[in-house]
Image (tube, rainbow, N blue to C red):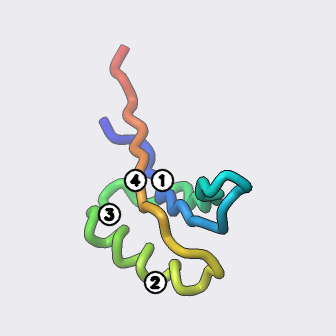
Amino acid sequence: MLSNSRLIIVFESGYNQIGEPILKTKSFNNIKTAATNEQLKAVADALIPLQGWMPYKVDRANTYALDL
């Protein structure tokens, strides 16, 4: 059973000395488990312009409870 969901937005904040992107992560915990991926994408789309960095990727991390 799905017990928890988290929205993760990864931003590209610049480049290191050898040209690889420097990544910064913003996580939003305790997302309603009933939220659809489309709803989370809409939230991410609203939050991304508020940051000073370019978006790199958006993820959803789900935690499931195992029956014992």
Disc 3 on helix, strand or loop?
Answer: loop
Checking the image for residue 6, the label placed there is 1
- Mark 3 and mark 4 residues within 8 Å of each other at the beta carbon: no
**For marks 3 and 4 on the same chain, the one whose residue lies earlier in the sequence:** 3
Three-letter code, disc 2: Ala
- Mark 1 and mark 2 residues within 8 Å of each other at the beta carbon: no
Disc 4 on helix, strand or loop?
Answer: strand
Q: Nearer the viewer, mark 3 or mark 4?
A: 4
**For marks 4 and 2 on the same chain, the one whose residue lies earlier in the sequence:** 2
Closer to the camera in the image, 47 or 36: 47
Q: Residue at x 28, y 62 (%)?
A: 37
**For marks 3 and 2 on the same chain, the one whose residue lies earlier in the sequence:** 3
Q: What is the C-alpha distance between the residues marked 1 and 4?
A: 6 Å
- Mark 1 and mark 4 residues within 8 Å of each other at the beta carbon: yes
Q: What is the C-alpha distance between the residues marked 3 and 2?
A: 16 Å
**Disc 3 crowd, CA 10 A, few/some/many (<14, 14-19, 20+):** few
Checking the image for residue 46, the label placed there is 2
Q: What is the C-alpha distance between the residues marked 3 and 4?
A: 11 Å
Checking the image for residue 35, the label placed there is 3
**Disc 2 crowd, CA 10 A, few/some/many (<14, 14-19, 20+):** few
Question: Where in the figure is residue 63, as x and y percent of width and height?
Answer: 42, 38
**Disc 4 crowd, CA 10 A, few/some/many (<14, 14-19, 20+):** some
Q: Residue at x 35, y 78 (%)?
A: 42
Which quarter of the figure has residue 11? bottom right
